Amino acid sequence: EAQVTQNPRYLITVTGKKLTVTCSQNMNHEYMSWYRQDPGLGLRQIYYSMNVEVTDKGDVPEGYKVSRKEKRNFPLILESPSPNQTSLYFCASGYQPQHFGDGTRLSIL
Amino acid sequence: LAKTTQPISMDSYEGQEVNITCSHNNIATNDYITWYQQFPSQGPRFIIQGYKTKVTNEVASLFIPADRKSSTLSLPRVSLSDTAVYYCLVGERGGADGLTFGKGTHLIIQP
């Protein structure tokens, strides 16, 4: 079954404590991306990757890092999380159409 | 990517046909039109994609006029479970650029 798997689904943590949200896809897609979704602001792209070792900033990259060492994995890294990064995060795979994961609800206290 | 414009919200009733229009005046020759559906706290789900004329699947139809500057997503006989946000995106298939979803159209179906 074609899947985009994100982990964890929920996380409550504190300011400054580094965290990583993992994303894995089994569709052999070259393009993967991360979004955050906040009430009233819609889906905003954080980073995207066109292929292994190739990444680029989306609309809201500040405070985030990504890496793409393997085709199937695209982790999102928050090195020093802050409360304004509390949000619902989605990983997606493919490009027009995209296939989305189930989301990660992140709370930074 | 072509900029798109959709209504912020729409209301309808169960059993009705709903049409949501998206404007994309600067669509490029290689661009496709893709529609997604999103329920609260879930990731967007691909509904339908088209290049020109009409595309139909088990969920919806997509109508694209000859000039391709707009498209209409048609949902036949909607039910309460069709209440969701619908997004229209325009871009190449298999592209490699950033993607902007916009705020979509919040469709509310009433009994």
Image (cartoon, coloured by chain):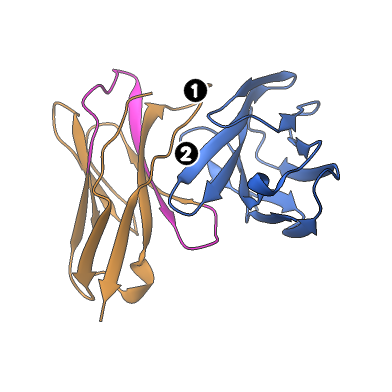
Chain colours: A blue, B orange
- List x then y, in percent, for residue B101: 42, 39
Relative to A62, B105 lies left or right: left
- List x then y, in percent, for residue B77: 23, 69
Element at badge 1?
loop
Q: Nearer the viewer, residue B10 or B51?
A: B10
Looking at the image, which residue is at 80% across and 48% down?
A15
B23 over B79 or under it: above or below: above
Q: Nearer the viewer, residue B71 or B62?
A: B71
Residue A88 is at least partly visible in this image: yes
Relative to B47, A65 lies left or right: right
Residue range of the region highlighted in magenta in the rendering: B22-43
Asked if marks 1 and 2 fall on the same chain, the answer is: no
Element at badge 2?
loop
Q: Quadrant of the C terminus of chain A?
A: bottom right
- List x then y, in percent, for residue A47: 62, 30
For the residues labelled 1 and 2, the Cα–Cα distance comes to 10 Å
Which residue does the numbered mark 2 point to in the structure image? A97
The three-letter amino acid code for the residue at tag 2 is: Pro
> Does the magenta portion include B23?
yes
Tell me the tag on residue B95. Answer: 1
Looking at the image, which residue is at 43% across and 51% down?
A40
